Structure formats: structure tokens, C-alpha cells
Image: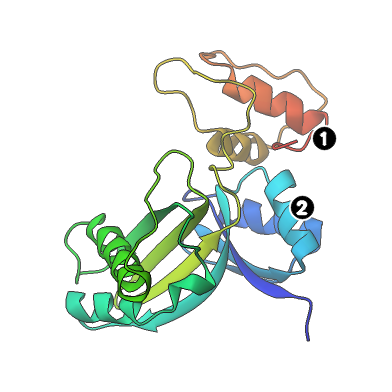
Amino acid sequence: MSSNYKYTAKTVKGLEQLLADELKSLGAENIELGRRAVHFEGSRAILYKANLCLRTAISILKPVFTFRFNNQQQFYDKLYQVKWERYLKLEQSFSIRSTVFSEIFTHTKFPALRMKDAIADWFVSQYQKRPSVSLDSPDINFDLHISNNTATVSLDSSGASLNKRGYRIDGWKAPLNEVLAAGLIQLSGWDKKSEFHDPMCGSGTLAIEAAMYAANIPPNY
């Protein structure tokens, strides 16, 4: 059995190539650019390294199944047919993050609600009980990606978003996303040796990310 698995690293628009370059430096294989994402293959060790070391990734996903649907009812029906105990225990809590690019759904959050219903209904049909939903600290994070009439469900291996580095609790008004800050620094061509100036410093995100980048400190160390 091959020791490599397929993964997807999510990022913000415009940083896909930077993320691909980071993945290549970690030893990932079969790297393909996507929309706000980079698909790659690697061992579980690569998965752990990706969560620790990638500066331009928001989360690392492990796709578990993909299906096509023609309408909202069929979307629910196909999700209801999944044996959810493969991915989630009755006593565990879960959450669903969704990204939707489809004319079938006019509200981007509605598919996640229908997926939640399908999971709950499946467990009730099997055990007369259902797992609870937790928005703050779920045991299992699901990621739902819909493109036109194709849906992909993945397990989120990162837990909290990877832009939450842990070096600050609160930021100034509208703080810059850490992943975006890391990407901007790399795009600037800064050599990690010359002085780094941030004339619009608020929460210090750019300066902190630059310092970690220059010192080769993994962003989620």
C-alpha cells in the first residue's frame, strides 16, 4: 500500500504559487494549483510538517469523498447515505466549514446546514441520538467544498485556522491576516537581512511575521 495520501492546502487568493513553492520545499509531490488552494500528495509526516511549517496555508485538508448532485434534495440524499461513523463518533462534537461556488445554492451557508442535518439524521436513524455541534472547539472539523454540482467533503487536519499563530490574543482594529502578511512579505522580495520597515504598523503582524521568516521559526511552532 502506498504511504502517500492526497491532501489540499487552503490559502487566500493570490498566494497559491507561494504555497506550492513552500510545499515543494517540504517534499510534497504531485503539486497542483487550485482556486485558493493547492492540491498535493505526501506521507503523514508531510502532513504534520505542513501544519507546522507552512506560512501561507490556512488549513490542510484530507479529502474523504466526492459526489455530484443536480439539486438541493439530491445533495442532502447523497450525504445521508454516507456511513458517518467512519469519520465521527456519537460522543464527539463537530463543525462544518463551507466554500460554495454554485448556482444551485443561493446562500453559501445553506449547504453546511443541510450537511449538518444529514449527519444528525443519519445518527438518529442508527442510534436514536446525534452528535453535537460545536463552533468553538469541535472534536472533528469537516470542510465542504462545492464547485458547480460537485461536492467534496474533507477532514480538516489543522483544527483552528493556521493563521492563528498563537503569538497574540487580540489585535488592533481590523488586524491583517497572518497568512496574508506572510505572503506579502515573500512577494516583496525582502532578503531577510536588510532592515524591515512597516510604516503602517498597527498590531505588528507584518513585523512579527518578518521576524519569524528571517529567523526560520516555523509559524505554528
Quadrant location, the N terminus: bottom right
Toward the front, the furthest residue is 128
Q: Which residue is mark 2?
A: 49
Secondary structure beneath disc 2?
helix
Residue 131 x, y percent position in the rendering: 39, 57
Left or right relative to 135: residue 138:
right
Q: Which residue is mark 1?
A: 216
What amino acid is labelled 2 in the image? Lys
Residue under the point 19% across and 57% down: 107
Quadrant location, the C terminus: top right
Q: Please tell me which residue lies in front, 157 or 93.
A: 93
**Placement of 146 over or under 81, stated as above or below:** above
**Placement of 101 over or under 221, stated as above or below:** below
Left or right relative to 59: residue 53:
right
Can residue 191 be seen in the rendering of this structure? no
**Placement of 171 over or under 110, stated as above or below:** above
- Image colouring: rainbow
Can residue 2 be seen in the rendering of this structure? yes
- Disc on the earlier residue, 2 or 1: 2
What amino acid is labelled 1 in the image? Asn
Residue 44 x, y percent position in the rendering: 75, 64
Residue 219 x, y percent position in the rendering: 70, 36
Crowd rating for badge 1 (residues with CA inside 10 Å; few <14, some 14–19, many 20+): few
Secondary structure beneath disc 1?
loop
Left or right relative to 133: residue 186:
right
Residue 39 x, y percent position in the rendering: 59, 68
Residue under the point 51% across and 13% down: 202
Q: Please tell me which residue lies in front, 97 or 180.
A: 97
Residue under the point 46% across and 50% down: 13
Spatial CA span between label 2 and label 1: 14 Å
